[in-house]
């Protein structure tokens, strides 16, 4: 095991932020997730969500964004590993995309459960 180093820890954060920025710059689906997350945060402020609701919303946003970044990492790796069309490579990429979709659908359902009663109370 390597000796602990603040400089190396700092570099690990630098590389992590570089990866986040790469995903934001290059992935259209990441843009969509960020627009939805921003909209949900604004709605949460408007509806004065409880602490518990904020925890749930924050966890969901975090999970969906992390899944999108992992999906991007898998796609980049598979494209590097198998640049030619390959059925198994396609399956791996489809599976990773499916994980993001499941996370996003789950987040949307929970968002509806949290926000729909608040929206209905306006009418």
Image (spheres, rainbow, N blue to C red):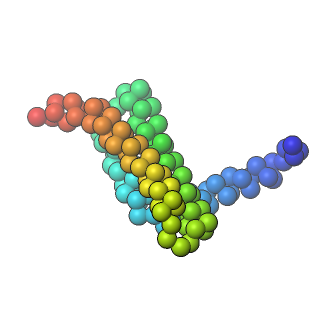
- Residue at 55 percent across and 57 percent down: it is 74
Residue 76: x %, y % from top left:
56, 64
Taking the image as drawn, is residue 50 in sight? yes
Figure check: 67 above or below 110: below
Residue 50: x %, y % from top left:
37, 27
Residue 60: x %, y % from top left:
43, 39
In the picture, the quarter occupied by the C terminus is top left
Q: Nearer the viewer, residue 123 or 26?
A: 26
Residue 21: x %, y % from top left:
55, 61
- Residue at 16 percent across and 33 percent down: it is 120
Q: How many marks?
A: 0
Q: Nearer the viewer, residue 58 or 79?
A: 79
Farthest residue to the left: give it.
Answer: 123
Farthest residue to the bottom: give it.
Answer: 84
In the picture, the quarter occupied by the N terminus is top right
> Going by the image, does 24 lie left or right of 119?
right
Figure check: 65 above or below 14: above
Which quarter of the picture shows residue 114?
Answer: top left
Which quarter of the picture shows residue 94?
Answer: bottom left
- Residue at 54 percent across and 52 percent down: it is 70
Q: Nearer the viewer, residue 48 or 21?
A: 21
> Going by the image, does 77 lie left or right of 122?
right
Which quarter of the picture shows residue 109?
Answer: top left
Taking the image as drawn, is residue 48 in sight? no
């Amino acid at each position: 095991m390597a000796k602990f180093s603040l400089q190396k820890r700092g570099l690990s954060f630098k590389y992590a932020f570089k990866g986040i920025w790469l995903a934001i710059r290059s992935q259209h689906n990441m843009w969509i997730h960020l627009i939805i997350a921003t909209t949900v945060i604004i709605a949460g402020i408007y509806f004065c969500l409880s602490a518990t609701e904020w925890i749930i919303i924050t966890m969901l946003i975090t999970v969906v964004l992390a899944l999108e970044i992992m999906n991007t990492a898998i796609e980049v790796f598979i494209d590097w590993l198998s640049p030619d069309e390959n059925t198994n490579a396609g399956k791996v990429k489809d599976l990773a995309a499916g994980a993001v979709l499941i996370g996003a659908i789950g987040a949307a359902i929970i968002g509806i459960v949290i926000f729909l009663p608040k929206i209905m109370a306006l009418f």
